[in-house]
Image (cartoon, rainbow, N blue to C red):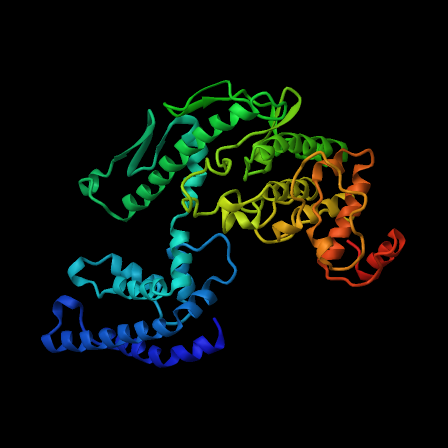
Amino acid sequence: MTAALTAAWQGPRTLVVRAEEVLADVPRKADRTPEQRARVNAATDDARRARTAFLAEHGQAVYDALIGNSTPLPRLDELLDAAALLDGLVPTREQMAAEAGLAQADKEGREIDQAVFFSGVLRQERAGLHLMESLLRPTDRALALLPEFTGRGSVDLGRLHVERVGEAAHLTVTNPGALNAEDNDLIAAMDVGVDLALLDIARIRREIEVSHLLGQQTHYMPILDSSPQDGWLVMPMAQATAEGRHDDLRDPASLRGLVEALMDVLEIAHTHDWLHRDVKPSNILLLDGQWTLAGWGIVRRPRGETTKAGRTRFEIGTEGFAAPELFVAAHEATPSADIYGIGRVIAWALTGKYPQTNVQLLPDPGPWRNITRVATHADPKRRPQCVEEAAPSPSAPACGQNCTPCRNQTYPLASWTRSSDWLSALTQRARFLAMTDSGCTAGSRTSRTSGVRGRRACRRV
């Protein structure tokens, strides 16, 4: 929290503190006299007006300070925890827990105080839109249970049973202790159940759709049988996942084979404007001695065949492996998002570490480090833009300057790795992209030799 916001909060905070002192000085709600009730009401009303006025003026700044550059987007409980850092802006967890144990008639209205905070945030155009986008994300529990639901067709959530029936998902409430009425546990289960229903049917249909395009490709995990109407599919049993063969992938030759397999299948998909958007080790499967790419359930269809514009509002992909733009505008992603995933898989294979969101992960110095650096550039425009066969033009500018031709030059990934000296070729391109990205003005565009000297004068990758 910034010093300016903390200072601005001190005046309203005195009224909040006063309200808490009044509450502490009177008996429980049912035992108060009319005078005590009036005193409490006046104090709490003053506190709420102070919170409302503070958020009307500083709501956007408060929201920006609370979330920073966090991805994924915050949920309501996470935002409340962060807001509690500004003492008194929202009720504490302890206050909410005490309130939850009371009958409705005995509550002090702590939920109203939370509502005042969210109202202040939602009234800010930019903060309100950002928060609404976060609320459209599927829950973490739903994402964790999705593979089980996809495979079995049903999941028991305790208060709720979710089952796939034909093209629909049936959600059956099993909350007899409350006569099937809503309580906090049932509401949480409903959130998960609805997420599973929406994600499951869409994923299966996408898997089936993309199989029509890639079904004969060697490095695509095939579908043996399926029914889009009933929402099921059958795939062959894989011998292993990339995760299970991690030790083997530390060998450059084995890793190269995996990377080439990914590029082969993605090249076809990208040519037809399909994006995978979830390249990660658990989706890379070994079948009959060949690496294959599975997990096409969140594939982005070609333009004009996608879901309704604006519907894809939550983030897509797996944290750590997904490109940053997939957390912001997944619908607008380009093939460079899949190339980012390949780079993260390379980094994972060689370091043994699972990548963290927005944290650079590079292998030890060497050609693979340069490849990874270029493929996982935070700016999608600074990554290779495709995995087509066409090699980079030999006349591509290598001036060592941050000029427009350099920045506009794109470099296909597949042609580098498939060349006879693929590591050397890609290393040179990686150094070139890093050089132009640094804004270096050293060197000359008159000769390749002067360009190399220019790179050495800037920084080495």
Nearest the viewer among 189 and 225 is 225
Nearest the viewer among 379 and 359 is 379
- Residue 359 drawn above or below residue 52: above
Residue under the point 41% across and 42% down: 141
Q: Is residue 91 visible?
A: no
Residue under the point 41% across and 60% down: 79
Q: Is residue 7 visible?
A: yes
- Residue 358 drawn above or below residue 116: above
The quadrant in which residue 110 appears is: bottom left
- Residue 64 drawn above or below residue 210: below
- Give the image location of residue 26, x and y in percent: 19, 74
Nearest the viewer among 19 and 49 is 49
Nearest the viewer among 235 and 6 is 235
Question: Quick check: 331 left or right of 432?
Answer: left
- Give the image location of residue 218, x and y in percent: 63, 22
The quadrant in which residue 254 appears is: top right
